[in-house]
Image (cartoon, rainbow, N blue to C red):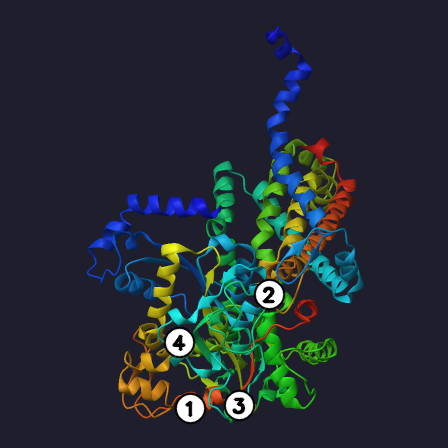
Amino acid sequence: MAKPKVGYSRRSFLKTSGAAMAASTLPAPMLWAQETKDIVLRQFGTGVSNLNDVANKVKEDLGFTLEMTALDSDSVTQRAATQPDSFDIADIEYWICKKVWPTGNLQAMDTSKIANYDKIVGIFRDGKLTPESTIAQGTAPHTVGFVDGPGGTSFAETETGWMTLIPTIYNADTLGIRPDLIGRPIESWTELLNPEFKGKASILDISSIGIMDMAMVCEAMGEIQYGDKGNMTREEIDKTMAIFTEAKQNGQFRAFWKTFDESVNLMASGEVVIQSMWSPAITAVKSRGIDCVYQPLKEGYRSWGGGIGLSSSLSGMELDAAYDYINWYLSGWVGGYLMRQGYYSAVPETSKQFMSENEWGYWFEGKPATGDITSPTGDVLAKAGDVRDGGSFQERMGSVACWNAVMDENQYMVRKWNEFIAA
Amino acid sequence: MAANILKNRHVLGWLQAAPLALVLVGFLLAPIVMIVIVSFWGATEFSIYPAFLWDNYEFLFGSPVTYKVFWATFKYAFITWALTLSIGFTVAYFLAFHVRSLTVQIALFLICTIPFWTSNIIRMISWIPFLGRNGIANQTLISWGVIDEPLEWLLYSDFSVILAFVHLYTLFMVVPIFNTMMRIDKSLLEAARDNGASGFQTLVHVIVPLTKPGIMIGTIFVVTLVMGDFITVRFMSGSQRANVGRLISNDIALLQYPSAAATAVVLLCTVLIVIAILLRFVNIRKEL
């Protein structure tokens, strides 16, 4: 779809569709003139943060329409790289940004227009959670978070005032386990390849994330010492794949999963007792009444972060609207919503205002819950006295061992990954 | 004058053939040519660029995984073919020769198509809870005392992949075989009987030879469907097994279009060769 045509047709479409009428009847604070309600921003991204509740709230608070499209990580990369005119806002992960930024499909954002910029967690600015923190391996968000200027094509090392992505959501990932079926403590990443779980383990079939989980395992086993897990050499990739191919051929894995739902089903049905998993998937398993733990491991977490980037073709009033959306995003409501699912918000202090003391204590501070903890959809996830797996924000984000990454040898890795799946 | 041109049988023939020819050129030939061209292009992580490189083919033929995957593809195709043929032939034989009334024949035939009222994917995925470790199949077998431990190979294995293939594609065997069987002159069977042929001899010497075109059409359907499939293999093996289709779909997901195109070209050639060989056995056109 060609951009100019879209701009025209979306407006005329809205006039006839009645969506504009619906908007004008909402008692939302109208900051701009009439035309605001005609603005449509098209956002796409992974399922984690592309939530209809967010779009509805945007309509209510800001007046314009946000169209959401949820895709898997590979498709998101593909779309951001190849179809720049198909979106206004890209909700992508930092490692995807590293891949997509060189295409010039995204534009840098002026941090002086971001009201809560100073309150954004250090991880996304200078890379440090606290001044003493060491920076984890991989594509740490701050390394691809800034460019030199509005038209910058290469990443800057320090805060420059021009951000590539505004951080929105992030978390520390680890292995999910079924404690009821394992029956003993799990403490290390090595357990993924423990023959005890032969035919009951799983790993995700998304190369750039899967390779990191593999690396965590191989390093924990003491088989490989990586220079940088986030930027492996060919030799390191070969060794890693060899270890996992052997395990695969020995029947260690029950299945590989590619989508969120698959991981939930594998775990909930008992096909798998230990696997790579994402936090809300644990929540989904738990809400079915099945015991499932997001097990903190001694080697640390594999972390990821997402942010929103603006299409380079955004300009004028729509660009202003996008900035308003970003400021709104960081102002707390979304943060609170996401934190209640187990993610973290880039500006925790604003999110706090939208969470109860009990929720804040449980999700962020790692304190025992004082009452029922419910998901945004109302399922009870924890009862009074329960503590979050892994503890507080500082404990969890403080023990990140590596970030999801894209390597210099990415293409080689991808081919090797393909071979691993086929082996 | 104009009327004369239209009456010319050559012009008329060309005109009549033109719509189909155009459709085929636009929607079959052009895409294939495009795929062949792209298979020589180069790729970076996020883009493809025109070039004339043998890299994609070199990598494809240089990797032992390719051969393994092609072997797996043939294996799936062959086993699925053998099973769908025996089931399909039996069902068609029963419908055509054992059921006497035409109404019952049609009714039973329609029953065969009922599963096709739902989507392919649903029919496939519905096996997963059935075959799982704690699924109905295992629970039933355990409660009958047949097994003590759940059978692991029921799901996410070659078994489940082939089971799903057979389930999905048997009808493609039944239909053409049933169709040719219905057109066998019943008097031929009577003649065989009168000449003292046993039931089995009639089957082998009369029915099977006359049903060959149907078998061949069904074979082509099943073989091409199985060789081109990727989604069944992905879901039923839990991403653990691969056939050529999965190789291509993985490449596409990872933005490696040229490499995917090269694999597609090789797969296309392989399937065409298989069909060419099959057609050596039976002259379908003569029989239709």
- Crowding at dot 1, Cα within 10 Å, few <14 / some 14-19 / many 20+, comes out as some
Describe the element under mark 4 as helix, strand or loop.
helix
In the rendered image, which residue does mark 3 sit on?
A: A297
Q: Are marks 2 and 1 in contact (CB under 8 Å)?
A: no
Nearer to us: label 2 or label 1: 1
Amino acid beneath label 3: Leu
Establish whether labels 3 and 2 are both on one chain. no
Which image quadrant for residue A55?
bottom left
Lower position in the chain sequence, tag 1 or tag 4: 4
In the rendered image, which residue does mark 4 sit on?
A: A117
Disc sitting over residue B160 in the figure: 2
Describe the element under mark 1 as helix, strand or loop.
loop
Nearer to us: label 4 or label 3: 4
Which image quadrant for residue A372?
bottom left
Q: CA distance from mark 2 to mark 4?
A: 53 Å
Indicate whether B12 appears above or below A24: above
Q: Which of the pair B194/A242 is nearer the observer? A: A242
Q: CA distance from mark 3 to mark 2?
A: 35 Å
Lower position in the chain sequence, tag 3 or tag 1: 3
The image shows residue A214 at horizontal and vertical percentages of: 62, 80
Q: CA distance from mark 4 to mark 3?
A: 32 Å
Label 2 resides on the chain identified as: B
Disc sitting over residue A391 in the figure: 1
Residue for point 29% across, 60% down? A59
Lower position in the chain sequence, tag 4 or tag 3: 4
Label 1 resides on the chain identified as: A
- Along the horizontal axis of the image, is A420 left or right of A321? right
Residue for point 71% across, 41% down? B212
